[in-house]
């Protein structure tokens, strides 16, 4: 029988549908904001990564419009050929200054940073030591290397120490890599303990701070700053697509790191560079963080209020320490029903189910926003209380 070259596409998709594991996309009609129109319905937004509501900040929008007028709609090339504009270089200098680093390199996305840089930092004869709950982009970056991989239990410093001892026996280089904030549970990596454990072994420390940027540390400078170990973290990877409200990833560290990465990292070398409007908006986002501390302060004020009242209603929010606030529900079917009911009540918060989390760890993942008012939070909490009782999740 002749082979059907693409028949598996339909079969595998239908298998996902049968298990209720397929994504059903709801479309924003307008900006990502605390009040958004999703699928034609006005909702309170509780699942955007736009923590500080900077996507709609007037300074970012003005910067984008001005850059399009002065520099055009696109860059015209990849960065190493003809796609590096003065705006790109200005942004990298601003990132380095904001992060208290010598230099930075800006990538197309956070995923592109991990996928392009990790495989160049280690190879055959080396060892990567990675937290078991690290983000998929870290996992894929590690898979692209020929390095040995050692995985330690989540935030388990005893296991990390064991991995370091094992790696030390025969490895040319050792790379310890962890998220700064874990995106599903909202807990924080013990970056200080990771850095201190790695130091005696001469291990390189790489922190993916996608969800810590703009959230933790002095003025939102991230997890390494939060723990006061910037001098012991060799690579800080961050993104502008979350708290900073735009798009694009970066690696910040030494001058040597930047020069190494821009010569060897293929996701940087072979990807067209961001258009001027995007770069100008990223620069403006840093300006806002440096001059308007109220956004980080409001984020944490809203976070504390929302968490406190969810717990008082009887919900389990797991081990969250950040604006990422899961409501643990256990069964995938319960989480999906709960999310659908929230949408009906005017709250947009999506279920996180297997295989993104373990089969018995389904949850609604809420992400608090600095732009939400107390009235918005109370509206969402009232919906949670109503549905929680309706589905017998809370008494």
Image (tube, rainbow, N blue to C red):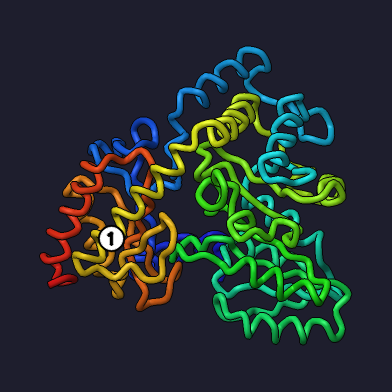
Q: Quadrant of the C terminus?
A: bottom left
Residue 221 horizontal/vertical position (percent): 60, 47
Q: Would you say residue 50 is visible in this rendering?
A: no
Report the number of numbered marks: 1
Q: Is residue 250 above or below residue 125?
A: above
Q: Residue at x 68, y 60 (%)?
A: 229
Q: Residue at x 69, y 51 (%)?
A: 113
Could you say which is closer to the camera, residue 333 or residue 158? Answer: 158
Q: Residue at x 77, y 62 (%)?
A: 119
Circle 1 residues within 10 Å: few <14, some 14–19, many ≥20: few
Could you say which is closer to the camera, residue 243 or residue 263? Answer: 243
Q: Mark 1 falls on what kind of element?
A: helix
- Mark 1 = which residue? 308
Q: Quadrant of the N terminus?
A: bottom right
Which of the 4 image quadrants contains residue 203? bottom right
Q: Is residue 367 left or right of residue 96?
A: left
Q: Is residue 361 above or below residue 351?
A: below
Q: Residue at x 69, y 33 (%)?
A: 91
Residue 333 horizontal/vertical position (percent): 26, 69
């Amino acid at each position: 029988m002749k082979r059907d070259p693409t028949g598996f596409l339909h079969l595998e998709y239908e298998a996902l549908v049968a298990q209720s594991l397929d994504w059903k996309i709801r479309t924003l009609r307008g900006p990502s904001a605390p009040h958004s129109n999703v699928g034609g319905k006005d909702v309170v937004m509780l699942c955007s990564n736009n923590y500080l509501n900077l996507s709609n900040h007037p300074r970012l929008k003005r910067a984008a419009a001005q850059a399009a007028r002065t520099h055009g709609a696109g860059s015209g090339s990849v960065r190493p050929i003809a796609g590096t504009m003065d705006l790109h270089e200005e942004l990298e200098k601003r990132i380095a200054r904001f992060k208290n680093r010598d230099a930075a390199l800006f990538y197309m996305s956070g995923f592109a940073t991990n996928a392009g840089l990790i495989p160049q930092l280690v190879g055959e004869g080396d060892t990567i030591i990675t937290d078991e709950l690290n983000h998929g982009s870290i996992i894929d970056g590690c898979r692209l290397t020929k390095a040995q991989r050692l995985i330690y239990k989540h935030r388990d410093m005893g296991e990390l120490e064991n991995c370091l001892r094992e790696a030390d026996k025969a490895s040319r280089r050792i790379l310890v890599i962890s998220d700064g904030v874990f995106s599903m549970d909202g807990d924080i990596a013990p970056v200080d303990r990771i850095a201190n454990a790695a130091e005696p072994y001469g291990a390189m420390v790489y922190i993916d701070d996608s969800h810590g940027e703009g959230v933790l540390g002095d003025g939102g400078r991230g997890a390494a700053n939060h723990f006061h170990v910037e001098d012991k973290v060799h690579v800080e990877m961050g993104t502008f697509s979350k708290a900073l409200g735009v798009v694009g990833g970066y690696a910040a560290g030494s001058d040597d790191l930047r020069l190494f990465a821009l010569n060897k990292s293929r996701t940087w070398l072979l990807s067209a560079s961001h258009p001027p409007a995007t770069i100008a908006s990223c620069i403006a986002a840093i300006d806002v963080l440096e001059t308007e501390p109220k956004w980080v302060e409001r984020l944490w004020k809203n976070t504390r209020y929302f968490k406190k009242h969810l717990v008082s209603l009887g919900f389990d929010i797991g081990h969250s320490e950040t604006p990422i606030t899961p409501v643990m529900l256990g069964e995938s079917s319960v989480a999906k029903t709960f999310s659908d009911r929230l949408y009906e009540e005017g709250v947009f918060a999506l279920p996180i189910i297997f295989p993104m989390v373990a089969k018995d760890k389904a949850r609604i993942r809420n992400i608090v926003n600095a732009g939400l008012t107390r009235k918005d939070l109370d509206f969402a909490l009232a919906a949670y209380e109503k549905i929680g009782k309706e589905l017998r999740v809370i008494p």
